[in-house]
Every structure is written in structure tokens, then in C-alpha cells.
Image (cartoon, grey):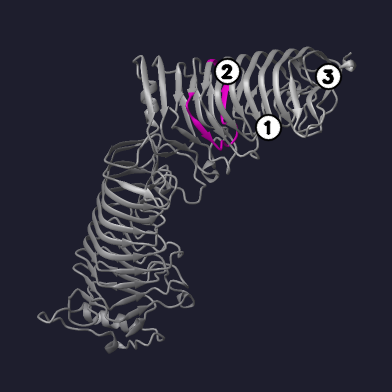
Amino acid sequence: MQEFVKYLAILGFLLLGSSFADDIWYPTYDVRDYGAVGDGITDDTKGFESAWEAACKKGSGNVEILGNIVAPPRSKWRNTASDKWLYFHKVDGLTVIGNGQGIINGNGQTWWLDALSFINCNGLIVRGLKHVDSQENHISVIHCQNVMLANLHIVAPAKSPNTDGIRISRSTNVDIHDSIMETGDDCIAITGGSSRVKISGIACGPGHGISIGSLGKDGAHDEVEAIAVSNCSFRGTQNGVRIKTWQGGSGFARSITFSNINFIAAYNPVIIDQYYCPHKTCVKKESAVKVSNVKYVGLRGTSMTKIATVNFNCSQTVPCTDILVDDVNIVPIDQEAPSSQCIDAHVTEHRSNIVFHCRKTWEAACTNGSGNVEVRVPPGNFSVSRLKFQGPCKARSISFQILGNIVAPPRSEWRNTDAYGWLYFDKIDGLTVTGKGRGIIHGNGQTWWLYAITFSKCNGLIVRGLKHINSPRNHISITKCKNVTVTNLHIVAPDTSPNTDGINIIGSTNISIHDSIMETGDDCIAINGGTSQVNISGIACGPGHGISIGSLGKDGAHEEVEAIAISNSSFLGTQNGVRIKTWQGGSGFARNIHFANIKFNAAYNPVIIDQYYCPHRICSNQESAVKVSNVTYVGLRGTFVTNAAVIFKCSQTVHCTGILVDNVNIGHIGNEIPSAQCINAYVTERMSNLALNCSNSK
């Protein structure tokens, strides 16, 4: 029997079908006796309404569906209320049963709206139905109490919009169990005003998992509490168990437990998102729905998500509190280390393979009044959005240990976010950042270019033992710092990546950088204006653009650099070697600069002074320039690829002076006679194979 029903609103009590059990007799009102045909073509709505009218007068409350109820196509919905299809209103003690035979077909591929709604129905039982292709929500339970839904099979295409399996709104004491849900949206969604909901034995997938929310939309006050989800599985779902709230709302989501959950190749298995905004057009607001007392116990399985297997993205002003993660073991399907993202959440963790490092940790360390404190990032993958670690701090020294991987989000996550820097340390004296040879900073730079780690006004800084991969722009920026040591780093970026300086130094003094490997797409180290007393040694640079002083004097700026020593370093296949570069039109100086014991291996342009630096070739000729003086090159060795091993291209009006080339032997890789270019430079040469000819210096 297949019934074609256009629209049915049912008020009071209803009996439809036949008796439920052999030993209990109920009067039966068969819709066919009231005009329904059941051929799948005829509109049987009137037959259902007439059967209902007769049954309602008898006062019974059971519905048995043994055939198929089919929604009409979209064309039949003209001039008809379209918010609901089958609508039960104020029917207490109602039981709707399909005995494993009844099918409700929402014909959803042509029209999306609520299919089966129960409103103000207390003591409701729904079981044994198959629900196919709802227009929107398959089953809505609204303002109901004491509800049981069991043995359901809900099916909709994975790409169908808004096809929640069961949606619970403002209802209490609801039990949903032993059902299969294959949907295009949430398998189950629990929204505001709901409490004492128990969900178990649900096989969810495809779909968006089981969600609390969304809550607080348009500033609403929503309350959800006493929710228990257990013994469920999620196969290939877009999300797993999720709590989602909008900014600007109020209320709470509390006393929520997820236990004994199994994930099979699920995306985003565990989520709390207090910044829910599916259309990415939300304005930042301070108020939020409070999320507290949430437990995750005995979660297992595999995740398709490489970053943030567990994601707690909580409000800065209304953080998540009392979050328990106990006996959780979720692994990426590719067997990489599991990761988490944890922002503004207070998390307690036991027996879990996912380690949490929440942003509030910094505040606790910085305000600690004891002499020495430690911030620890343990092994694991930690996806973090933009973070600013703000000082000054009360602690005399802070050790920031990175033993796991810190990963930047993709470009799509940087909307409406300050893109100047990712990890930003500001005004923190006595800071040590160490990786002990294990910590990795992954800038995810192939999708977004900006500064990765910035140290600003940090005196007595030590950075050591880190590996830094694919920065969006500069890997490490040191700005207005004093007394800095950087050592034992390994910096890696593709050789074609733009502006990926390894270390960029600006306005800083007394800097030591040594014993590090730098493979970049731009300068391995760049020394900019306002910097002095820099000692660089033991650097293996390549690929990249070498080690540069500058560029200086851009846009007429006055810049000063002095007392720079670079020694015992090597350059493998670099575009440049050791370089001083200044723009025309600037002023200031670059002086007392010493390059010693440098080795080049198939480097392009090993030695350069360029006072006509102009990367885009559109600069006008100007007379003023940054003065370059007292520069020494001692003990330089190796091979080069280009025509000139040494290029001194100095200003006609502000010549380079005091240039010493001593014991330099750089041979062409093709055994050609090495050459040099020397314009407007005063050079003293000793024991060199270059035969510099600077007769035009004057």
C-alpha cells in the first residue's frame, strides 16, 4: 500500500491501520475505508483526514503504518503551508509504529521542508519506521515530554541540505535508541530548551554527526542540559559529536556526556565551537552561550582530519569550563600523530592519546610571581590560530618548551583575522623558546603568506632546538630586541616560496645566531636597519638568497647597521652568497661588517655590494645613498655558477670605501677564469684569485 498524502495536520487522537497486538484489540480505521486509494498517484490526503476524524471521536492514541506514505512533488505545494508535511499537535499518549514495514517518503529530492512533526505531544512513542528523503528535518520533536523513538531507519542523500534525522526543540525526557541514520545534515540535533535527553545505539553516517545546537543565534537565550550520548558509531560523517553556539547569544549548554563512541573514518570527530558561523559573515561579539561540564569518555576510532582531531574553539570572554577528556583514543586514518586545537577551554585529560595545550596556559605562566616558570607543549599536533603572548610578565624567566608540532590553520581560517603575524611574543624579558630537537613549527605556508613567529621587544631571548617548516613569510622575526641567542635551528621552505626569510632582524642589538641549517625561498638571514653587534657563525644556508645586510634606505629612509660578523658558514646552491643591498635615495650607513671563513658550493653571485638595489626595475636615479664602508672579506673559498664571483656596484656619489678582499679563492664551476665587477668602490686586495680591477673607483 502506497499512500500519496499532500498535507495532513492531526489534532487530538488518531488511529490509522490495524491492531497492535493479538491479545489487545483496538478499533481499526483503515484509510482505504475512507477514500484513500494507495496507488502512489492519487492524492489520498482526504482519506487520511476522514479516517482521523472518525478515530479521534473514539479517543484512542495509536497509529500503525504498514504501507508507504509519500509526499507530493514540489508542484503540488502551491498555496499550501510548506513548513510541515505530517503534523501531530497536542496528541498525548500517541504511539506511531511501523513494525519494520511502514515507510514515510518525503520525496525530498524535489522539495525541502519539515516532514514529520510532533508538537506538544506528551508520552509519545515512535518506532519501527523507515523514513526516506525528507524535505528538511525527517522528524521534529517540539515542546514534547516523555518521548521514546526507537528502531528507526532514516535515509537521505549525503549532499541533501538541512536533512536532519531527528531535531529536538524545547523538549524534555527524550529517549532515542537503536536506530540507523543516513542523512545530509545532523543525524540528531538538540536545540534550545531541551533537557534530559538520552541517545544510545545510533549508527550515524553519512551526515554531520550528533549536534548540540546551534544555540544563541541572533542573540537568543538558549538552555540545554542533561544530555547523554552513548554507544553510538559515526561512519564517514562530516562531524562527530559537536556543540555549536553563535556569538552574541546567552544561556548555557551543560552537563553533557559523550561515552563509548566509535568513529570510522570520520571528519572532525570532537568539536566545541563557540564561534559557529556557517556563512563566515559574523561580527565578533563578547557575549556567548556558556559551555560547561562536558565529558568525553571512551571515544575510539579513526579520523579523516589531519589537523584538530579534537577541536575546542571556545569564547575568549565566556570560556568553556570543566571539560573532561578520559580514555580517548582517536587516530588519523593515515596513522599520523593525532592533533588537537584548544582555545580558551579548561580541560582535564586522562588516558588519552590526544594531548591538549590550551591558550589560557600562557596567562597563568605570565602572571606567576615565582622566579622561573615553564610553559610546555607536549608531543602531539596542535592546530592554533593567531596567538599573541603578551608581556611584561611577573616571572623572572619563562621557558617555553615545544616538544610537539604547532600547525597554522589554512588560509580560509584567516578571514577577519589580523594577518600580520601568527605566533607573536611581545615584551617578554628572559624568555627561552626551546624544542630540544623535537619541536616543530609548521606555518602551513603553501596556502598563506604572513609572518610566522615574531619576537618584539624581548630582551635576554633564547631560541634553540626547533624545526621550522613552511612559514607563510618570515619564519622568525626579531624586532627591537636586545641580547638574543638563536641556535640549533632547522628552517625549511620551498626554494620558490616568496619572502620566506629564515630569520629577519630589525632594530635589534647584541644578537648571536649560530649552528643552524636554513633552507628557504629568500634570505637565510636578513639584517635590517637599526641593528648592530650581530655575530653569525656555523650557518648552512641553501637553497635561498644567502645572508643579506638590508635592504636599507627604501623610500628615502635613514637606516644604520654596524658591527656585523659572519663567519664559518656555507652556501650551497644559493641565489646569492653574502650581500649588502641598499636603495638609492636613502641615507645612513652600513659599516664595520666582516665576512670570514665562508665556503660557497655552486652558489650564484657569491659576493655582492649593490647600492642600486631595485628588485622591480622601476627605480629612478637618485644621488643620495646609504654609505657602505669598512667591509672585509677574509678566507672565502669555493665555487660559483654565474659570470662574476664578486660584484661591487657602488653609488657614483656615495662610494663604497674601506673594502678589504683578503685570501679569497672562488673558482667557476665550469673552470672558466673567475671574474669580478667593481664600480665606484675603494678596494684593497690581497692573495685573491679574482684580480679585481677597480681603477674606475674614483
Q: Residue furthest front?
A: 671
Residue bearing the label numbered 2: 480
The magenta segment = 464-483
Of helix, strand and loop, which one carries label 2?
A: loop
Q: Quick one: 443 or 95, which is closer to the camera?
A: 443
Residue 576 place in picture, x, y as percent = 71, 29
Q: Residue furthest left?
A: 23
Residue 149 place in picture, x, y as percent = 24, 65
Going by the image, does 13 lie left or right of 563?
left
Going by the image, does 625 lie left or right of 520?
right
* Badge 3 density bin: few <14, some 14–19, many ≥20, Cα 10 Å: some
What's the residue type where badge 3 is placed? Leu
Name above or below for residue 109 compared with residue 49: above
> Mark 2 to mark 3: distance in Å?
38 Å
Residue 247 place in picture, x, y as percent = 42, 43
Q: Is residue 474 magenta?
A: yes
What's the residue type where badge 1 is placed? Thr
Of helix, strand and loop, which one carries label 3?
A: loop
Residue bearing the label numbered 1: 574
What's the residue type where badge 2 is placed? Lys
Which of the marked residues, 3 or 1, is nearer the chain's N terminus?
Answer: 1
Q: Which mark is residue 692?
A: 3
> Mark 1 to mark 2: distance in Å?
28 Å
Q: Quick one: 126 or 92, which is closer to the camera?
A: 126
Q: Is residue 215 visible?
A: no
Q: Quick one: 426 or 455, which is closer to the camera?
A: 455
Which of the marked residues, 2 or 3, is nearer the chain's N terminus?
Answer: 2
Residue 179 place in picture, x, y as percent = 27, 65
* Badge 1 density bin: few <14, some 14–19, many ≥20, Cα 10 Å: many
